[in-house]
Image: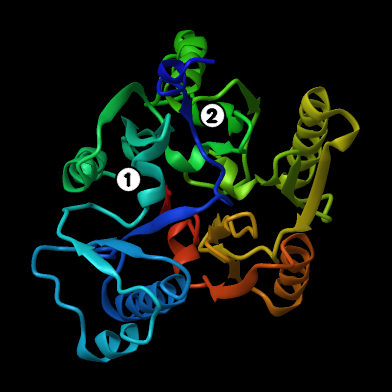
Amino acid sequence: MKSSSLKKIVRSPAEWEEQAATWLSFPRHPKNWAGEKGVQIRAFYFNLIYNIAKFQPVKMLVPKDWELPKEEEKAFLKCRFAPQAYKIATNDIWIRDYGPFFVKKGDKKEIVQTNFNAWGAKFPPFLLDNKVPSAIAKAENLPISDIPFIFEGGALEVNDDGLAMTTLDCLIGKNRNDPKDLKKILSALCKKLGLRDILVLPEGLDGDHTDGHIDNLARFVETNRVVMASEEDSTSPNYERLMEAKKLIEAWLKKHYGNKAKVDTLQLPPQKKMGKEILPASYMNFIFVNGGLLFPSYEPKTDKKAKAYFKSVFPDRKIIAIDCRVVIQEGGALHCLSKHESA
C-alpha cells in the first residue's frame, strides 16, 4: 500500500493500547452534587485523579473559578504526572458520553464528535456538554469532524481490529435518532471511526438511565476476547437479557475469530436501589491506564472475584479498586466519567 493511502486510514485504538491521557470533568452540577454528597464526590475525584496520575497524565475540565485545594496540591506533587486543568464549561461529569472520540488517521491524531442530548433529553441542560469536543479540539489544536447523529461514547466498545459493540436503544428511540436512519448511523460510525463491523445488541442492563450503554454490559479485554456481566438470580430482569447477549456475542466473535473467540463473565454486584430505581452497578465499568487497570468496587465479596479476574487476564498490569458507591448513585462509574485519549 502506498504511503499516501496509509495516511488516509482511520483507526480507533483499543483502550488497552498506549494512552496519552485520561480526561475528566470535575463535578459542578449544583443539584446533583450539593451538600454532603458534594463533599463525598470531590473526595472521590481527588482519589481517582491521584490513582490515574500514578500511571499517565490527567486532563481535567474545570470551572473558570477553579483553584486546587492546598492539601490536594501537595498530594499531587507525589504523582508521576501532574494533572492539567482546562477551563472548559460543562453541565455534568459524564465526559465518556459527551467527550470526543480520539482516532488515528495514519500517524496523526484527530477528534470525531457526535451530537449529545443527555440520553434522549432525559437530563437537561446539556448544551455546554455538547460543545466539549470542539473546545478540546481547539485547546489541543486537533482537527475535528462530525457524525451528525445522537450517540454517546459509553454506547460503543471497540477492539484493536475494527470491531465494535453497541446496543439498539442507544442508536434509535425516543428523542434519539429516527429508526429509518439506523443503517446510516452504523455506516457513519464505521467510516468516521475506522470500524468494519458493529454488533448491535438488543438492550443493556436494567435500570441504566443511558438506555443501556455497552460499557456496563460487555467489554473487550483482548482482540478476540470479551468479558461481560452475568446474573445468577433467575428472577432478575437482567437474567434473560444477559443470557441472550452472551449467545449473540459468542456467535459474532466466532464468526470473526473462529475457535480463538472467548467470552468470559463476571457476576454483577448485589443489586442496590435509590428509592424505587435500580442502580446499574457493574464491573464492566473499568478503565485502562498505562500499566494498570482501575475497576469500580461496590461490595467486598464480589469485588474480590472481580479483582482476581482482572489480575488473571492482565498479570502485568497493576489492578486497583476504586470505591464507586457515591458516584453510582447518579448512574455511572469509572468508565462513564472518564475519556481515554489514545497516544
User: Does residue 30 appear in this view?
Assistant: no
Specify whether 337 is left or right of 198.
Answer: left
Total count of labels: 2
List the residue tagged with mark 1: 123
Q: Residue furthest left?
A: 65
User: In this view of the protein, which residue sits in the foreground, 94 or 9?
Assistant: 9
Name the quadrant of the N terminus.
top right
**Mark 1 residue type:** Phe
Whether residue 81 sits left or right of residue 193 in the image: it is left
Indicate the secondary structure of the residue bearing disc 2. helix
Q: Are marks 1 and 2 in contact (CB under 8 Å)?
A: no
Q: Residue at x 69, y 65 (%)?
A: 269
Q: Return the residue at label 2.
A: 169
Which sits in the foreground, 180 or 314? Answer: 314
**Residue at 65 percent of width and 67 percent of height:** 317
Instruction: State which quadrant residue 70 falls in.
Output: bottom left
Where residue 106 appears, as percent x and y from the top left, is 43, 29
Q: CA distance from mark 1 to mark 2?
A: 17 Å
How packed is label 2: few (under 14 Cα within 10 Å), some, or many (20 or more)?
many
Q: Residue 14 lies in what quarter of the image?
A: top right
Q: Secondary structure at mark 1?
A: loop
